[in-house]
Image (cartoon, grey):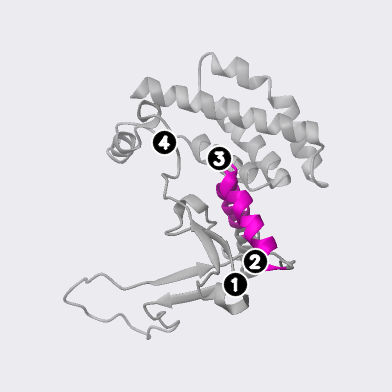
Amino acid sequence: MVRTQGAPQRGVFRGRFPRKRETGEVEAVPTTRVTVVRPVPFTSSDEADAWLASLRGENGALEREAAEAAAAVNRFLRAHRAAAADPWAREVSAEHALVVRVGYGVGDEVAEGRYRAAYELPRRPATQRRREDLAPAERLAAIVGGREQQLACEELVLRARADLDAGRPREAALQARIALEAVLAELAGEELHTLGAHRAPVAEAANSALGGDPASELQAAVAQAVEEMERALRRRRLRQV
């Protein structure tokens, strides 16, 4: 269920000609609330309470529930992207949401943000990484200032990682193959020998993906290759810090 609230949405048609403006004030934007609802309802309030209590009592369970909800939203967005032929329809993650709540309620009440009981998850950075690993602000300045080159393989590896985390084994295999070839072409040194060993299994997985999901062992090979590529790129960034 999707609800848009806050600032009114701007019209599709903005006129035929540009309009002169004297100021560039910040435009108010709407906020979208997406609620993922399980297809089978709870049989009673006691059952719902027990479900929520079990999530609260297990370490990381609420976060996993939020991640599963985000995955469901992304499946919808993926279908929308294909149906609308819109390459800019981006996916979402629980870490980037303004607010994440896990709870239960009744029908339209939940769609309007009202719960019988719910927990709001604390906000965390999108990635928990050591400062010396990435130093993103410093590296961003270096790339924008032309002091460091951004490799094509960096973007390709990120896409492969996104497919893996979203549970898209076919896309992950195909993307990993392209990413691996780019990594082998753009990196130099000892990484080439280690990464080159992944070429055959990743290629087999990509070929298999043309007809459907690769076998589980090939999916594991793709995941391992992506992890090795990430480590190689991380070592490169550390050398340049």
Q: Are marks 2 and 1 in contact (CB under 8 Å)?
A: yes
Q: Nearer the viewer, mark 4 or mark 2?
A: 2
Q: Does 236 sit left or right of 175 as displayed?
A: left
Does the segment drawn in magenta span residue 55? yes
Region rendered in magenta: 44-72
Task: Pick whichever, 75 or 185, lies toward us.
Answer: 75
The residue under label 4 is which amino acid type? Answer: Gln
Q: Secondary structure at mark 4?
A: loop
Residue underneath mark 2: 37
Please tell me how crowded label 3 is: few (under 14), some (14-19), or many (20+) other residues with Cα within 10 Å: some
The residue under label 2 is which amino acid type? Answer: Val
Q: CA distance from mark 1 to mark 4?
A: 39 Å
Q: Main secondary structure of the magenta part?
A: helix
The residue under label 3 is which amino acid type? Answer: Leu
Does the segment drawn in magenta span residue 197? no
Q: Does 123 sit left or right of 113 as displayed?
A: left
Please tell me how crowded label 4 is: few (under 14), some (14-19), or many (20+) other residues with Cα within 10 Å: some
